[in-house]
Amino acid sequence: MAIVGATGAVGEELLQILYQRRFPVGELRLLASSGSAGRMISTPGGEVRVEAASTESFRGVDVAFFSAGGAVSRELAPAAAAAGAVVIDNTSAFRLEPDVPLVVPEVNGKAALSHQGIIANPNCSTIIMLVALNPLYRHGGIRRIVVSTYQAVSGAGRRAMEELLGQVKDFAAGRESEARVLPVASHPRHYPILFNLIPQVDVFAEAGYTREEWKMVKETQKIWNDPGVRITATTVRVPVLRCHAESINIETERKVTAEEARQILAEAPGVSVVDDPAGMEYPMPLYAAGKDDVFVGRIREDLSIERGLNLWAVGDQIRKGAALNAVQIAELLLAEGRLG
């Protein structure tokens, strides 16, 4: 097994989850940039030295998890697949390629079995939304989705998490903070995230939407194999460390009541319903961190249309939005005898 990007936030989470879920790891290769090569990482199987990732790193590897950025995946994932590894890629490099399955196990797990060497992990916001919506889509159909996201800084990587924590310390000490990471680290202009919301996640693309917003549209249509479902998204970065939240409004094909929706979601894999307005119980990032499920609440009918529902979904971006989803894909392949 190989993990490319082993020293990043998602890579570290992958490593923890593999051992927590008792995945048969065998020989483990931890791969990263040349700057991280030589670093020792402690695992339940002992200390493992990080190696510089190259096209020669994948001989004898059964499964390779990639979470080191799209450029690295485009360069090395084809080489890993050619060496016989099944690549589970957590970047946007291959998500919309027609011959690459885009998989959320609770939604379209069987699609993973048709891979040709590379399987793509969807965008974290897409994963969280579809785990919550797929049971309703299968039950009553969905014609239209309007989603606004409240995305944790973890989605922008370890540097963004460190910057938020640094801004907290600076504020407490009465110091000024310099923003260097958000909304996009490679761009010349940056904004502080503490006490702020930034209505830009990723770079701007066509029609004034960001790439993150288009990812939610196009990935959902691909995963459901439904180009007719209409989706509009607004993605916002918020001062939360690692859990994304989403306000979702849907128009269904047939009437689904709020009570029906609660019952359907309560029985759905990967979903926990937390929905008791009288008791002030609803999903919150603080309590979803480190958890596997997507938490759904505030389920209520949209009284402005005939077949509308509102709901609020929260999921751990690093975990279910990235690392856990990738491990679940590997578990699915293993159960089907498609690994090793």
Image (tube, rainbow, N blue to C red):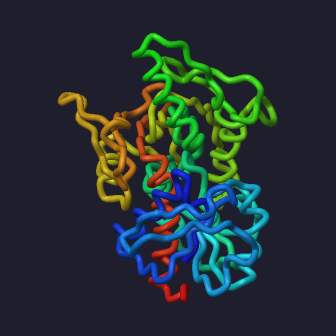
Q: Is residue 280 left or right of residue 24?
A: left
Q: Residue 281: name its quadrant.
A: top left
Residue 78 position in % (x across, y down): 76, 73
Residue 224 visible within the image: no
Residue nearest the viewer, comparing 234 with 31: 31
Farthest residue in the right direction? 206
How many numbered marks appear? 0
- Rendering coords of residue 278 (x, y %): 19, 28
Q: Nearer the viewer, residue 334 or 258?
A: 334
**Residue displayed at 50% across by 89% down:** 337
Residue 141 location (% of width, % of height): 52, 52
Residue found at x 51% / y 35%: 162
> Horizontal placement of 131 versus 225: left or right?
left
Image quadrant where one finds the C terminus = bottom right
Q: Is residue 111 above or below residue 82?
A: above
Q: Give the vertical position of 306 relative to 119 (above or below).
A: above
Left or right of 338 in this view: 174: left
Residue at image position (50%, 13%) is 175
- Residue 269 visible in rendering: yes
Q: Residue at x 76, y 56 (%)?
A: 71
Give the quadrant of residue 101.
bottom right
Query: Toward the viewer: 288 or 114?
Result: 288
The x and y percentages for residue 152 are 50, 36
In this view, which residue lies farthest toward the top? 174
In which quadrant of the rendered view does residue 204 lie? top right
Q: Nearer the viewer, residue 277 or 192?
A: 192
The quadrant of the rendering that contains the N terminus is bottom right
